[in-house]
Amino acid sequence: SRAERDTSADEQRRREQILAGAQERYYEHPMQIQRGWRHHLVDTTGRAYVDLVNNVAGLGHGHPGVADAVDRQIRILNTNSRFLYHELAEYSERLLALLPPDSPLDTVMLVNSGSEAVDLALRLVQAATGRKTVVALREAYHGWTTAGDAVTTSAYDNPYALDTRPEWVHVADVPNRFRGTYRGAAEDRSVGARYAADLGADLDRLARRGRPAAGFICESVLGNAGGVLLPEGYLADAYARVRAAGGLCIADEVQVGFGRTGSGFWGFERSAVIPDLIAIAKPMGNGFPIGGVITSRAVADALTSQGQFFSSTGGNPLSCRVGLAVLDAMEAEGTQRNAREIGRRLAAGFRALAERHGIIGPIHGEGLYLGVELVRDRDTLEPAAQEAAAICERLRELGVIVLTTSERSNVLKVKPPLCITAESADYAVAALDRVLTEGW
Ligand code: PMP
């Protein structure tokens, strides 16, 4: 066993020589991660951290069930999806069985990532409606492909200036009841209704200009904004208006699906709606690249107007076996229940801290998708972005990995592996308390 040493500076130099400048990395002085186990990461010096950010590793790092599935299946068969083998149908049926009982969705298309899933969903709504325009919300992230990037409206992520965004994208107001156009308490149903009415007015305007909407895409909980929950009634109202205008509704569940919110398996269940298309990825493979779109046969079959659809590795026997192993483990290990219970505990911990630390503003999210918004003033909500970055650096020194998100980079995003324990959750809250008490 080789002596543990801090190789992070060497590794950082090496990366800077060969990677593009736009390729993001975390921290001013990043540690070099050597291994992961459950909700922990361990660096090359042997230091262990509580991992509050890896939502792809939904089951936790180094999951033995997933490792066994890869090992077994890659030795047996791995071929492209144009051959007949049973794993593809088995996995697709399992995914469909996870939908609410009244869901009419019956068709699955598998790809390799969230960006591909979103890209395919966009093509599907355009093919199925014969229209081009897609409505996306402000401050959203939906992926890096050309189409996914076009509907990515967040200033932080998106390289398009507003005036060069492709003409087929219409950007609608983001329904953030904390700092958006309309504000109000969680139980104030008029907030969601007003945002939805504005969306309706946008849809009318688009139709009048000869650009009727093919579809509407949004996250079922606003992940990029830091887990901001949609206002009461918004999504049902928005979906009804999109459908009345002849469009289709895409739920981007890449971040918030698969039990993360704890209350349901899907983020959209919070709003008692069923989308026309669901884009899924991240936790499906627990780090193995899998993505997909779940939709209806009528929508999926519209793609035949564009020729054949085929992804070389999407839906292959290996990724399907991994997907099945992930679903088995999620059930056996009760990850959704843990998300609900530990999520409640974490949120209560953050709320208690807010009573003593004025920098804590709104606390967003549900289950294990939480956002702790840091502000310089609770009335003006002036973002505490530099403070948030410094707090993350200090938390890292204390053994907690958490990072910032949102348009203003002032929200600590808390989306750990779903296996996180009460003990580690308490440790993370205590560490944040210490940083806010001692300074950063
Ligand atoms: N949609 C959302 C909501 C996402 O957060 C992401 C990734 N952060 C994507 C799509 C794209 O997924 P991927 O990185 O797997 O391409």
Image (spheres, rainbow, N blue to C red):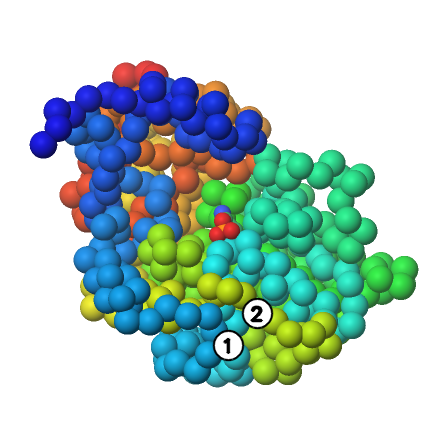
Q: In which quarter of the image is residue 281?
A: bottom left
The residue furthest left is: 1
The kind of secondary structure element at disc 1 is loop
> Where 386 sits versus 85, above or below?
above
Q: Mark 2 or mark 1, which is nearer the start of the sequence? A: 1
Name the residue tied to disc 1: 82
> Circles 1 and 2: CB distance less than 8 Å?
yes
> Where 271 sits versus 194, above or below?
below
- C-alpha gap between disc 1 and disc 2: 8 Å
Name the residue at 46% across, 70% down.
80
Name the residue at 52% across, 72% down.
109
> x, y (%) of residue 79?
41, 70
Name the residue at 28% across, 17% down.
438
The amino acid pointed to by label 2 is Phe
Q: The N terminus lies in which quarter of the figure?
A: top left
> Where 56 sits versus 433, above or below?
below
- Quick one: label 2, few (<14), some, or many (20+) residues within 10 Å? some
The amino acid pointed to by label 1 is Arg
> x, y (%) of residue 316?
42, 69
Query: Residue 310, labelled with which disc?
Result: 2
